[in-house]
Image (tube, rainbow, N blue to C red):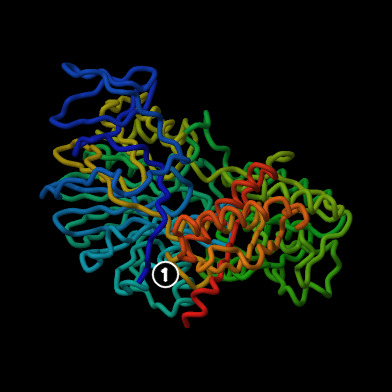
Amino acid sequence: MVRNHSVHSSRVHRANSASRSTRLTSHSTHRTGAAHGNAAVHSRKYGRRAQGRIPMKPLPVPNENQVPKDDSELVAPPKYRRGSMRIVALGGLGEIGRNMNTIEYNGHLLLIDCGVLFPDSQQPGVDLILPDFSYIRPRLNKVDALVLTHGHEDHIGAVPYLLREKPDIPLYGSSLTLAFVQAKCEEFGIKPICHVVDDKDTAKVGPFNLEFISVTHSIPDALAVAVSTPAGRLIDTGDFKIDPLPIDHRITDLREFAKQGEKGVDLLMADSTNAEIKGFVKPESSITPALDHAFATARRKIIVASFSSHVHRVQQVVDVAHKYGRKVVFVGRSMVRNMGIAADLGFLKLPEDTVVDLRDAQKIPDTQLVYMCTGSQGEPLAALGRIANGNHPTIQVNEFDTVILASSLIPGNESEVYRVINQLTSLGAQVINRDNAAIHVSGHADEGELLYLYNIVQPKNAMPIHGESRHQVANGLIAIKTGVDPQNVVLARDGDVVDLYQGKAAIVGSVPCHYVYVDGSSVGELTDEELEKRKILGTEGFVSSFVVVDTRINKVVKGPRIFLNAVAEDEEEFAAVRDDVTNTLERAMQDGTTDTGRLQQVMRRTLGSWIARELHRRPMIVPVVTDLAVKSKK
């Protein structure tokens, strides 16, 4: 059983009404009560003026660092109203990753995507972060299907964890996406039930009518999905962009989006990642000249780092390597697996004798090699991180080598990425990245492309997805520019319950939606409190203190002995606090405290206060108190 402990959402304190909605104007965003259909008017300072009501205290704009104290702050949603569509995001709102949306209609559930979020430096030891399945866990037998929009980890990475709980959930997706999922599930001993779909295909699962639409992204075979029920029609774009010259010649099908618009779209759930960026994303083919120049000027071996599922980028590297007579070596388990799948399905074209095995590469001169590896986000255990640290068993960086980071920089990974760049530079490599060359283009739509999408689809309601708060706000403002009523732009967060009823979408409450940490073989067992302890150990060190007392005479008979680990100060500097610890413990015993657990808390507080005051530190403190009186009774 997965146990979820840690609340980690970006929700602000909830209003006290049982029904509320999040609305957006061209000046501000603000959560406000929408009971009885009263339209709220917002001021520039995020306050509220409603007809016939006293102005309420302004609420802050939601941000990622605000975490509710506990689930009691959430406003529970009303009972599901038959004939409505209920949408709840279990991840992907207010964050980049773990994308997962649930659609409910008359007791039936449809899931769209099931991805992971990769941990940052504030989550030491965590391998992955999963969506919170607790909302759907009691009703997994009501899930009619899981639709997967494309094969990136932030959309498919958590599928095996969901199928461990119910292996027979049918999966719908493109051939490449499902092939990636099948390979992941094999590692868990799971054989998923897969239904391959393509552009313009339709499917009916339970009460849900599905229509699939081709979209361009940084991975082939990506799809958007239109979902129709008697309650209305919504579109989930997945990740997309409008590239007029895609590598695989498979463009975003704007004609199909227009047809959906003509049928009437009640809710558009669009990718928000690049909504803040003006203009249009450059074509994927535009980076080929920069790659060509890097290869033409390289003096020794070339190492290219990218996402293991970025088939388009790998194709470009393979093509340029073939042009310059270099052999390509795939490095990293996921890179080897995914490129093998892509090649088998025809999505990756490999010229004959261009790709060689890592073992065979040892016999080839550096001037004829290109290593295609993982680790573009600075992950220390990925191939590039190990190469930079000098820990890779086969590949070493030497002077005059060329390293290309050919991927985007995920927010939060900056320090790790630049650490790797500095390590590689210090080894003598020339590092080419987005800062000094046009070596990467995004797979997400910029503002101009989103304007096109909204104008083509003309939805009644908009619910920005896939992005941090600032991205969602920017996406909502774009929707307003194209004519969407500001009252119909819904800014939701993970766990917010959005009801689509009679053509109107509104937040009606929230359900608990926690971070579920994967830590080695444990899933959901690591709590935020334990994570905080890890951070303290890594940054502040460890102090332990041992004392022997005799509560019969209210005396400290031995100690305290203080030991330090990963603390810069010497143990001798703690001599000043030993008397304080002794005196405080003896006073506590004289006042009637004889329980060793409480005495340990007294010692922890005394040590902690002194360390904070004198050393300006906050280490983990482990006090141990042994009572001779207790031992004598035994």
Quadrant occupied by the N terminus = bottom left
Residue farthest left in this picture: 82
Residue matched to label 1: 160
Q: Which residue is nearer to you in this view: 131 or 478?
A: 131
Q: Could you tell whether 66 is left or right of 439 in the image?
A: left
Q: Position of residue 440 (x, y in %)?
A: 63, 45
- Which amino acid, mark 1? Pro
Outermost residue, front direction?
553
Whether 277 is drawn above or below 425: the answer is above
Residue 221 in sight from this viewpoint: no
Q: How many marks?
A: 1
Instruction: Tell me the residue at 69%/43% (across/down).
Output: 614
Q: Position of residue 456 (x, y in %)?
A: 34, 34
Q: Position of residue 555 (x, y in %)?
A: 58, 63
Going 49% across and 49% down the picture, which residue do you hit?
Answer: 217
Q: Is residue 592 visible?
A: yes
Lateral position of residue 29 relative to residue 433, left or right: left
Name the secondary structure under disc 1: helix
Query: Where in the figure is residue 609, as x and y percent of width and height?
Result: 59, 46
